[in-house]
Amino acid sequence: MEESNPSEAAENKSAIPLPESGEPQVQVRSLRELIDLVTGRNLKDAYAQEDAGLAENLPFPFLAVVGQKEMKLALLLALINPNVGGVLLIGPRGTGKTTAVRSLLKLLPEIRRSACFYGCVEEDIETGGIDAVCPDCARKFGRGEPLTHPDRVRLVELPLNAKLEDVIGGLDERALVHERLRLKRGLLSEADQNILFIDEVNLLADEIVNATLDAASQGSYTVSRGPTSATYKSRFTLIGSMNPEEGNLRPQILDRFGLRVVVQGLTDPTERLEVYRRVRTYQKNPRLLLSQFEAETEIALEEIQAARRRLQDVELSDKIAAISIDLIRKYGIDSLRAEITLLESARAYAAADGRTTVDLGDIRIVAPMALRLRRSAFMARYIEERSEEDKELEIAIDAIGQFEK
């Protein structure tokens, strides 16, 4: 196995305070080490503080989620590299799936977002010329003004009771009052360059699933209502959660999720007690719990930003790629999305670890998340039956030659 380059990882050091340690600071080399460090933290006395009430909705700190390293790693890899294809969290109720996703709010990285109603960006002009943007943006570009502005990635949730018009968009009722036809954006458009989270994705209506899959695969979609139509961009990272007890997920949508994590309940009594302590602290005084992880959260955000910048320089050798593809072939996976997810998540992991070269250790770590639940027993049986049929057909065709003689 190829070894990681310590000198590369050493360039990515940050100091974070450790309140319960005898030392004032500890050096952390990478985002991975930060997650391991915070997972072992203990809040023994924090829950005894005075109740501060719940004056506002403050998300549970992502780094305060106890255990569940694979789940946290998968979500972070999706933030670092959207090309991993999203994440599906599978597990029983009460294991922290939804809490973990909603806790990402403080860690969402910064991007360049269009300042135009139509979503025009500089890349449109680079690929399609000046006619690829609206007239207002064309004038701005001519004056040298930016078409985008810095903004944080957002978490857009798709509720189960959403209607198709809520998801893809439809006629603006306010405009109809004034006898004007105008389309309003849907949730899929709002999710562009953001994270689209679907809780209990296996219970989503078929028409919503189909619209979401089409928009995700194409990166854009068109809405037509009478003489009015509009095309919206939909380049989002899809994150879903589900409880298998409530029903299976259609193979069509299961294949669209890159990383798959089976989330199980914690078995360590110490960890379960720590969960209770942190939840009690959060319920009584959420600001106190947030303050306990504030420094680490800031550093994690910086590490995610740095990993996203480093990602473009991460190289993957032909040897590593060949070994990975051979693994997929031997495991009997048909979907070509397996290669994309495996290799892109390995690149994201290397970037998170402060390196610019993927090694076999990265493949070993991300392979379970990227490849599980991709083999189809039905397709294996179907192909085997078709193979037997083809053999019988070949025998029948060969028999034709006897009549020719």
Image: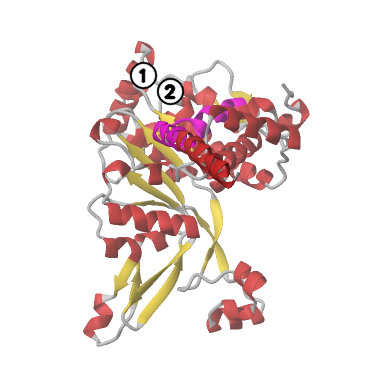
Residue 242 drawn above or below residue 125: above
Q: Quadrant of the N terminus?
A: top right
The dominant secondary structure in magenta is: helix
Residue 224 drawn above or below residue 2: below
Q: Position of residue 192 (x, y in %)?
A: 46, 59
Secondary structure beneath disc 2? Answer: loop
Image point (38%, 17%), residue name:
271
Q: Amino acid at mark 2?
A: Gly
In depth, the one of 240 and 96 nearer the eye is: 240
Q: Quadrant of residue 9?
A: top right
Which disc number belongs to residue 67? Answer: 2
In depth, the one of 229 and 334 nearer the eye is: 334
Residue 2 drawn above or below residue 251: above
User: In the current view of this chain or complex, which residue is farthest to the top?
Assistant: 269
Q: Position of residue 296 (x, y in %)?
A: 52, 33
* Magenta segment: 364-387
User: In the current view of this chain or complex, which residue is farthest to the bottom?
Assistant: 179
Residue 54 drawn above or below residue 158: above
Secondary structure beneath disc 1? Answer: loop
Which disc number belongs to residue 266? Answer: 1
Q: Quadrant of residue 14?
A: top right
- Few, some or many C-alpha atoms within 10 Å of disc 2 (few <14, some 14-19, many ≥20)? many
Q: Can the viewer see residue 191?
A: no
Upstream in the sequence, badge 1 or badge 2? 2
Image point (36%, 14%), residue name:
267
Contact (CB < 8 A) between labels 1 and 2?
Answer: yes
Q: Amino acid at mark 1?
A: Leu
Image point (24%, 35%), residue name:
246
